Image (tube, rainbow, N blue to C red):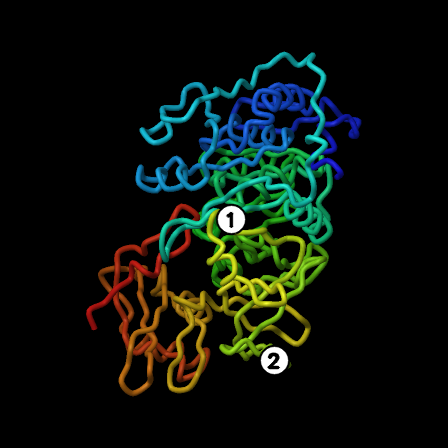
């Protein structure tokens, strides 16, 4: 099969082009080819390898080396507890762990043979082949563990063809080339930060600058000094939107970027509009998940419509289905259905879980995402939430929590909002709002919020109950953990 990283195998003609930069440490393509080639030789043929996935140069080198060796890599979240790490290691059975020399590993990981990642290997070494001759498009490249919200984390086996297919489809949608320089501060144990944010630039022959920790000053600095693209999650863009009014340098830097991309959760429309007003540049959204990598995106040459995740990417089939699996036949921007996808971007299986794998697919190969959406007549997709937590069936209506959350966030008295459903003897379920007020001493009343939603959306979508919080529970990617929002009502 063709190499995942042509620039590391002599096919590209720019060995001195910067490839990776983390803080003040960086590697050119020639240096990256050398260090990953040396490490690939050490791990080749040894079965799966775990990677202690800190936001460092060593993590990027470790994953690229494993891919070049044709060995599946298992990224480990350094923030995981020992019980979760023990489950992942027992389930994936890696032969060793790759880590930075200074990393202190917790007890379950210390039981593995350890290989320290050397990012200063001699650059005179000839690069190794891209992969073993036995590597095929369906050879496992990564095993990425899901969040485990409904049980122990499951290992999604991601093949090489899914990585290549997704990154090439995004190159088409985003007009992504070797001239682009990406800046981000995303974790490197998820699809977003690792596959899109590290492997994406390397497949194009471009550059990535990782900030280590998100900071609006650092974003402005990098976008003002040659970076062309920014990847972030809604929490990051919310902080940007909050900072912009008092930071003209940040506004200027964002306005000069070629592409601002948000993912991993829905970006509130209110933040979309505040960023666009301050910078003249609209954020585009894309939609994907661990098991599918990327499914849809707003195109760089398309309409950056706030609140949507754009169109299916090249090679991705997408449909919406009713509760009984019947496909929706009309896309009217109102009818809610579950997203199902099919294409070369999909994972192959949940490791050691044939039952879960079988349950995730229909008999004709469509993957059940569990995400609910509506689709406009022109094909644009708008996510309204997760089937398990964000679809509210109230008074005979299917209501997506996402659009109510966007409406609430447009109220000046609301800083953060989440919407869930609660059992109701009359309606089946009622809409419940969880609000972080802009002014905790003077929060908007429940009646005021209900009227605001009913006026902007429809009366049946108004919240019947409102809870006030000091903050919303979020995970590492900024997603609201709705299962932690509980009430005794």
* 425 versus 444 height, above or below: below
Query: Given this view, does label 1 or label 2 mark the residue nearer the observer?
Result: 1
What residue do we see at 37% from left, 57% from top?
150
- Quick one: 390 or 301, which is closer to the camera? 390
Using the image, tell me which numbered label, if any, was put on residue 332: 2
**Residue 138: which quarter of the image?**
top right
Residue 11 shown left or right of residue 351 in the figure = right
Q: In the figure, residue 1 lies in which quadrant? A: top right
Q: Secondary structure at mark 2?
A: loop
Position of residue 2 in the picture relative to residue 387 (left or right): right
Residue 19 horizontal/vertical position (percent):
65, 29
Asked if residue 265 is positioned above or below residue 259 in the image, the reply reads below
CA separation, marks 1 and 2? 34 Å
Horizontally, residue 159 falls left or right of residue 232, namely: right
Residue 93 percent coordinates (x, y):
45, 35
Q: Which residue is mark 1?
A: 156
Q: Nearer the viewer, residue 115 or 28?
A: 115
Q: Residue at x 73, y 35 (%)?
A: 3
Question: How busy is the neighbourhood of tag 1: few (under 14 within 10 Å), some, or many (20 plus)?
Answer: many
């Amino acid at each position: 099969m063709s190499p995942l990283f042509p620039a590391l195998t002599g096919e590209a003609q720019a060995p001195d082009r910067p490839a990776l930069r983390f803080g003040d440490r960086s590697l050119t393509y020639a240096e990256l080819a050398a260090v990953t080639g040396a490490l690939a030789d050490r791990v080749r043929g040894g079965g799966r390898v775990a990677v202690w996935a800190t936001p460092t140069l060593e993590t990027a080198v470790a994953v690229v080396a494993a891919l070049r060796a044709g060995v599946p890599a298992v990224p480990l979240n350094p923030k995981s507890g020992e019980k979760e790490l023990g489950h992942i290691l027992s389930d994936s059975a890696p032969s060793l762990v790759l880590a930075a020399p200074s990393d202190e590993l917790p007890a379950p990981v210390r039981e593995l043979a350890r290989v320290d990642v050397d990012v200063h290997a001699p650059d005179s070494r000839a690069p190794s082949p891209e992969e073993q001759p036995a590597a095929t498009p369906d050879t496992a490249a990564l095993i990425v563990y899901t969040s485990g919200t409904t049980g122990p984390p499951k290992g999604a086996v991601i093949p090489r063809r899914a990585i290549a297919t997704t990154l090439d489809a995004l190159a088409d949608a985003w007009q992504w080339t070797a001239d682009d320089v990406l800046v981000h501060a995303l974790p490197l144990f998820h699809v977003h930060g690792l596959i899109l944010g590290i492997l994406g630039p390397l497949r194009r022959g471009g550059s990535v600058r990782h900030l280590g920790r998100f900071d609006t000053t650092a974003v402005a600095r990098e976008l003002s000094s040659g970076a062309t693209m920014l990847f972030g999650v809604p929490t990051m863009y919310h902080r940007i939107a909050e900072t912009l009014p008092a930071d003209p340098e940040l506004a200027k830097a964002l306005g000069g970027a070629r592409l601002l991309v948000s993912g991993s959760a829905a970006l509130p429309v209110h933040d979309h509009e505040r960023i666009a007003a301050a910078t003249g540049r609209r954020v585009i959204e894309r939609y994907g998940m661990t098991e599918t990598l990327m499914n849809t995106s707003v195109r760089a040459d398309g309409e950056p419509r706030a609140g949507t995740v754009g169109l299916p990417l090249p090679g991705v089939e997408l449909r919406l289905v009713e509760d009984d699996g019947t496909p929706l036949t009309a896309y009217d921007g109102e009818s809610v259905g579950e997203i199902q996808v099919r294409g070369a971007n999909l994972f192959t299986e949940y490791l050691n879980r044939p039952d879960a794998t079988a349950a995730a697919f229909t008999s004709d190969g469509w993957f059940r995402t569990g995400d609910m959406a509506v689709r406009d007549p022109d094909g644009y997709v708008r996510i309204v939430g997760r089937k398990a937590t964000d679809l509210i069936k109230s008074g005979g209506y299917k209501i997506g929590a996402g659009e109510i959350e966007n409406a609430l966030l447009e109220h000046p008295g609301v800083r953060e909002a989440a919407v869930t459903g609660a059992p109701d003897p009359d309606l089946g379920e009622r809409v419940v709002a969880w609000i972080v007020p802009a002014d905790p001493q003077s929060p908007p009343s429940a009646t005021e919020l209900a009227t605001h939603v009913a006026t902007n959306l429809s009366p049946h979508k108004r919240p019947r109950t409102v809870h006030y919080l000091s903050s919303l529970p979020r995970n590492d990617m900024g997603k609201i953990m709705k299962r932690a929002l509980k009430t005794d009502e």
